[in-house]
Image: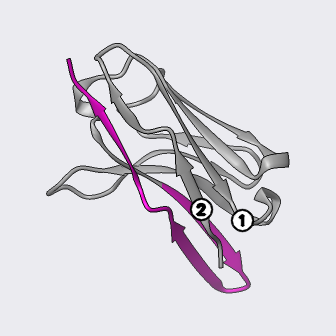
Amino acid sequence: QVQLVESGGGLVQPGGSLRLSCTASRSIFSIYAMGWYRQVPGKQRELVARIVSGGRINYGDSVKGRFTLSTDNAKNTVYLQMNSLKPEDTAVYYCNVELVQGPDQYAYWGQGTQVTVSS
């Protein structure tokens, strides 16, 4: 079981920046992958950015070059720095953790944090 605590959402103008953080209740070193997804009503949840065991980071195509994922292993926390925000980035952002234990894979989600980009 993993608990996730998210923070950092809010309202920002187009072109602005926000930083989201997500803290896990267990060591990042015991986690297969950790990152952020987002969802708008009526659409599927989509990948924003995730870091996989070994350090590889995957970004969604729409955020490449604007968003940066980083980690603080001592705090079991991942950060999503979002720059040059656009109205189409408006969504609920969910922190996600994937655990692999033998043949089984588990996914855990945070409660979600709203990001609204609007003038």
Residue carrying label 2: 4
Which amino acid type is shown beneath numbered disc 1? Answer: Ser
- Image height of 103 relative to 83, above or below: below
Residue found farthest to the left: 42
Element at label 2: strand
Disc 1 residue crowd, few under 14, some 14–19, many 20+, Cα 10 Å? few
Q: Position of residue 82 (x, y in %)?
A: 47, 27
Say what secondary structure mark 1 lies in: loop
Q: Quadrant of the C terminus?
A: top left
> Where is 31 relative to 52, above or below?
below
- Identify whether 68 is placed above or below 52: above
Quadrant of residue 57 within the rendered picture: top right
Front position in the image: 7 or 98: 7
Identify the residue shown where x is 65% and y is 44%: 78
Q: Position of residue 3 (x, y in %)?
A: 62, 69
Give left or right: position of 48 versus 14.
Answer: right
The residue that appears at 54% across and 51% down in the rendered structure is 6
Residue pushed farthest bottom? 103
To which quarter of the image does residue 101 belong? bottom right
Cα–Cα span, label 2 and label 1: 6 Å
Give the vertical position of 37 relative to 64 (above or below): below
Circles 2, 1 touching at the beta carbon (< 8 Å): yes
Residue 62, disc? none
Q: Pinpoint residue 92: horizontal percent, then vertical percent.
A: 33, 49
Whether 108 is among the magenta residues is yes
Residue topped by disc 1: 25
